[in-house]
Image (spheres, rainbow, N blue to C red):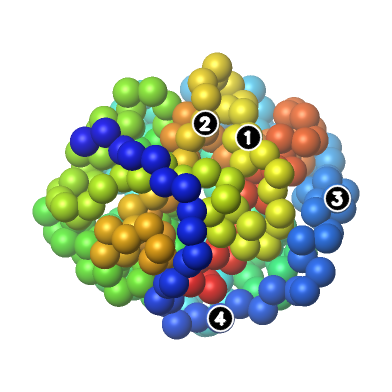
């Protein structure tokens, strides 16, 4: 089904039940974000080369990334799927779900810890499959490269329950016709849901930082970014349950930010959007 466009109105959402304290000066500190990105993460971090011969990617932590015990802190939670499948299905990188992992996840957590009042885990993140009941302990899930994602019947049932209970899902790093696969998999979870395009007027883009231009250019592909959402009860005045960053790859900026490989402005905006998504999920 072709998604339709929505110009945002006044929100009236029910939330997960978790609270985040957002500093009253949050919008005003946007100009400082570049300093935080480069200093908190460390310019010139050590690098290693992955098994598929890509450019070096930064080593954020020397210790392995492990499942984080549930202790009330926010931990970035990525969904694993199709291990060994897809165009990144060979060698150490594993399946397409691993793109930008773990550096993007850890770096975003560091920025959240530096800039917000959230109680954030740093140095480790979560990876779960949708069939795992542990996803219900984590209010926000992230799926990378959903153009290569497949979902099982059990996973679809779990994801549906998770979203209807108040969970929030982010899709990132997919372009063009890869949309079709993502939408087909989501249709197994929420068969009656509609994708609605949202623009910069929607509160999700202003929940912490005021982002003047939400259309952060894809770092590697010449495409035009767009944002689509599935709303609770199919009502655009209610909360977003699923957000898709189409023709976009925000996590690529997060991954490479310690190296200065990409320009400061789009990198900062990619972080601003990521922070906004997390704060929105906790406050709606």
In this view, which residue lies farthest toward the left? 153
Task: Classify mark 3: residues with Cα within 10 Å, few (<14), some (14-19) or many (20+).
Answer: few
Q: CA distance from mark 2 to mark 3?
A: 23 Å
In primary-sequence order, the first of circles 3 and 1 is 3
Tell me the tag on residue 31: 3
In primary-sequence order, the first of circles 3 and 4 is 4
Q: What residue appears at the point 36 percent right and 45 percent down from the top-left corner? A: 196
Q: Which residue is mark 2?
A: 225
Q: CA distance from mark 2 to mark 4?
A: 30 Å
Q: In what element is the residue under mark 1?
A: loop
Q: Which residue is mark 4?
A: 19
Q: CA distance from mark 3 to mark 1?
A: 16 Å
Would you say the residues marked 4 and 1 are in contact, meaning their CB atoms lie under 8 Å apart?
no
Q: Say above or below: 266 vs 121.
A: above
In primary-sequence order, the first of circles 2 and 1 is 1
Q: What residue appears at the point 61 percent right and 77 percent down from the top-left corner? A: 20
Q: Which of label 2 and label 4 is nearer to you?
A: 2
Task: Classify mark 2: residues with Cα within 10 Å, few (<14), some (14-19) or many (20+).
Answer: some
Q: What residue appears at the point 80 percent right and 54 percent down from the top-left corner? A: 30
Q: In what element is the residue under mark 4?
A: loop
State whether residue 216 appears in this view. yes
Residue closer to the observer: 139 or 132: 139
Q: Which residue is mark 1?
A: 216
Percent position of residue 84, x then y:
31, 34
Q: Quadrant of residue 120?
A: bottom right
């Amino acid at each position: 089904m072709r998604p339709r466009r929505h110009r945002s109105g006044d929100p009236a959402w029910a939330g997960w039940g978790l609270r985040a304290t957002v500093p009253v000066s949050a919008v005003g500190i946007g100009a400082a974000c570049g300093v935080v990105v480069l200093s908190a993460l460390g310019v010139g971090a050590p690098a290693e080369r992955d098994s598929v011969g890509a450019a070096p990617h930064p080593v954020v932590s020397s210790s392995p990334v492990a499942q984080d015990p549930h202790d009330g802190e926010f931990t970035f939670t990525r969904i694993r799927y199709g291990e060994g499948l897809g165009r990144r299905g060979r060698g150490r990188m594993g399946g397409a779900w691993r793109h930008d992992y773990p550096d993007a996840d850890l770096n975003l957590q560091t920025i959240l810890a530096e800039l917000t009042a959230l109680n954030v885990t740093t140095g480790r993140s979560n990876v779960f499959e949708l069939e795992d009941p542990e996803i219900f302990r984590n209010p926000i899930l992230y799926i990378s490269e959903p153009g290569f994602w497949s979902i099982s019947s059990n996973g679809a049932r779990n994801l549906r329950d998770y979203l209807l209970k108040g969970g929030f899902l982010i899709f990132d790093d997919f372009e063009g016709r890869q949309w079709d696969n993502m939408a087909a998999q989501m249709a197994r979870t929420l068969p009656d849901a509609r994708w609605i395009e949202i623009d910069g007027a929607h509160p999700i883009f202003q929940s912490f930082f005021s982002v003047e231009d939400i259309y952060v250019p894809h770092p590697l592909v010449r495409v035009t970014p767009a944002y689509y959402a599935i709303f609770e009860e199919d009502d655009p005045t209610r909360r977003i349950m699923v957000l898709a960053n189409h023709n976009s790859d925000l996590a690529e900026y997060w991954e490479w930010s310690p190296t200065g490989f990409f320009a400061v402005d789009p990198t900062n905006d990619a972080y601003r959007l990521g922070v906004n998504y997390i704060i929105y999920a906790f406050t709606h």
